Amino acid sequence: MNKNFSSTPQSSKSFHIPKSVIKTSRHEGCWHLEIRKQEKKDGQNEIIPLAELQLAELPPGLHGYAFIVGALFQSEKKPQEDGTQLYTGDGMVYRLGFEDGKAILKTRIAKTPCYYADPATQFYLGDYAIEPIPFTPFKNKILSKFVKKYKCFSYFSAFRNGGPSRYSIVLGSRNQLNTAFLKTRDHLLLTMDAGRAYQLDPDSMELLESVGSTEEWCGIFPVISRLTWINIFETYISSAHYVTDCNSSNGKQDELFTTNYSTGYNGKFKEPVNWVLDSNWFRKVVKLFYALLQIKFNPKQELGRFTHLIRYRFADEQKGLQPTMERWRLVLPDGEPVLVDQSLHQLAITEKYIILADIAFKMEFSQIFTPFLFGFLRLWKFNRTYSIGSWIYAVFLQAIKPLPFANLYIVNREHLDRGNIGYSIEDLPDNRTTIKVQKVTLPREISHFTADYINPENKKIILHVGHVNGWDVTEWITRHDTSVPGKPFREDLEGMMVGSTDLGSLGRYVVDGETGKIESCKTVQDIQSTWALSLYTHRELNRDSLTETTQEVKNIYWLSLGFTWELIPQRIYDAYKADPRRVVPVEQLPKAKENKPITLLRLDTQQMEIVDYYQFPSGTYVSSTQFIPSSLPCPEDIDESIHGFIVCAVMLDPDPSQSDRATDEFWIFHADDLKNKPIYRLSVSSDSNQKPLNLAMTIHSTWLPNIRQQHCSAEERRHKREESVKKDYQHLIEKKCKAVQELFNDIVFPEFTKQTLEDKFEEFLLPKDE
């Protein structure tokens, strides 16, 4: 890259970060998008209005369907809710299809069973959202018929946002499925870190059934849920990035790998608290309590921290095979259990190994439960700086910095089938099956990573890593934050994740899979383009698709979110300003009116050089980059790994005078030349009666060549859902109160089975006299 390229100056007419990032639409519908072609212009820093661009056709070779998912953080009419993080919200699935030269967008909300329990127990419906307190000031709000009948129950069972989660102290936690996808040989799955994945029908975009039943998963605190009876919507912690190997499973039962684990308590005083939870005497105390409460105690159940590898095999109706779920307890070479410090957010799979990464993406209990302890503060408007709310935030929600390194755990796949038979929750063996892993520690924290499929010398693992520094994606801008003196902090972006305070890097590691030794390491840093490295994409390998043959990641596309003071509050600056591992001293950070642009870059992993890039204009925010292979023959002078397109979601406010009016788009790049070849911008037609796109803050994505390969009829889909949802929850509600049973039997079970659209569901919830 050009090292002398100047920082992007902030326009006097608009902000660097568009207001669109914290607004979204919950509308479930279908759009035929306009296609406009934008020729590149060197040094272009202004957003070119769509009206100045000519209508065009899709580029030749662009085909298939891009699936993108994001969190419905803030709907257009809904007032701001304190304590809500940007990535907290129902998952919205966007399917961008390229059919017969047309670009067609379809959207659907991911509706798990808990989705239907949520609005039914709130003291509002849909966009009439307020703090659910059943007192006089809210008597004129629209209530559901269930709330009218069970006001007291609904008040205590209502779900509330807390950090990266949404929780009910009576019903449990929401499984919002807003993070990522997994495409196996025969199935498409929708995932998140704090919940079970669900199969997604790519044609209808309806959920089908979960990966494993509630009886096959361990909750984050199983003893607490049993003793408190908050065990209907249990919190199951898993990896958001499941893995599969189409190459090795070809001709066999379709399968995937993930994790099921608990980090224990991770707030203040976590070491003594976790020591108690893990101890034998605590197990004896729990057993005594179970006996007093006449609850069946399983002596083999995990009570404290644990880390399990999961292998799930899908049903195969043609061969008469039922789904199975196996688990292995992970231990280090010395026999000590693997304990996760932060989050096993991502896995990678190679021909011989599975790699689990403990990365900087943590869930803090103080974030989750603060809304229940201090929700009363929302009833008054306190002074921002000296209010009770600011004091409580400073004491109870202090920034807990990520670890300055990353632990990886390597599982030899051969050991899974070498006499180590996995076990299930219902029948835990006394000698629990364990798998020994090798531990690798990388010197910096990581955002995401991938690995080559091939293992050179039958034991080497090639890792491709995005290192971040001075950044915590689980922290967000709150109404109590203040600006760094003299810097343009954006108080109006409440809920947006904070920005990076230091420069990151890209790394390539060669690791010995048998010993865990790092044999070599190469890193790349660029003062323009390696800030806040977030997402990546590359052409699929042979493990990802039966039509691919490549085993190495030769080129990888990374998205850098750049640097801006608009996203750095005082408390985040204070947390990192004196960090001894800083790359860029705080005195040398960009000036107040300068920003580092969001950049899409291509890294040649063989040479470890940034060989191509595109810097987005100020006023845009970008996410969900997805490589789509071209359907045209690959030219001889182009490597197959760059023969295709990059699709991404772009949020922007084109009219500074109407910053609340989002007009989001999808942009398409030629993967072999990001800088010079045209961009194709997809948007809702200005001549149509439909509103402009207002996308959620999308995260990860995937691509399918077609959506009807595993077609299920409407009746087959309903049958799958009805059978699975009752298997999951019928036994959990049998001894609950009348309100719970009515909630499930009259609302959750039938509406989940039908996958009722949100508009229709809200109409269903209204009392008949409304």
Image (tube, rainbow, N blue to C red):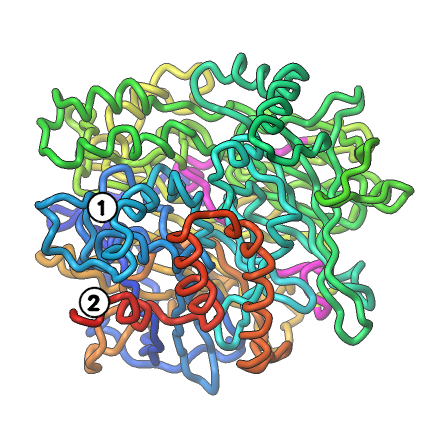
Identify the element where label 2 is drawn: loop
Q: On the rendered image, what quadrant is the N terminus found in?
A: top left
Q: Evaluate whether residue 38 shows in this view.
A: no
The kind of residue tagged 1 is: Pro
Label 1 Cα crowd, 10 Å radius (few <14 / some 14-19 / many 20+): some
Q: Is residue 19 left or right of residue 435?
A: left
* Residue tagged 2: 49
At x 27%, y 45%, the residue is 152
Identify the element where label 1 is drawn: loop
Taking the magenta stretch, the answer to whether it contains residue 476 is no
Q: Is residue 683 above or below residue 727?
A: below
At x 91%, y 42%, the residue is 419
The residue sitting at the right extreme is 419
Q: Is residue 9 left or right of residue 244?
A: left
User: Which of the 4 image quarters holds residue 321?
Assistant: bottom right
Tell me which segment is drawn in magenta: 521-547
Residue depth check, mark 2 versus mark 1: number of the one nearer the observer: 1
At x 82%, y 65%, the residue is 252
* Residue tagged 1: 132
User: Which of the 4 image quarters holds residue 44?
Assistant: bottom left
Residue 154 is situated, as x and y percent measured from the top left of the image, at 30, 48
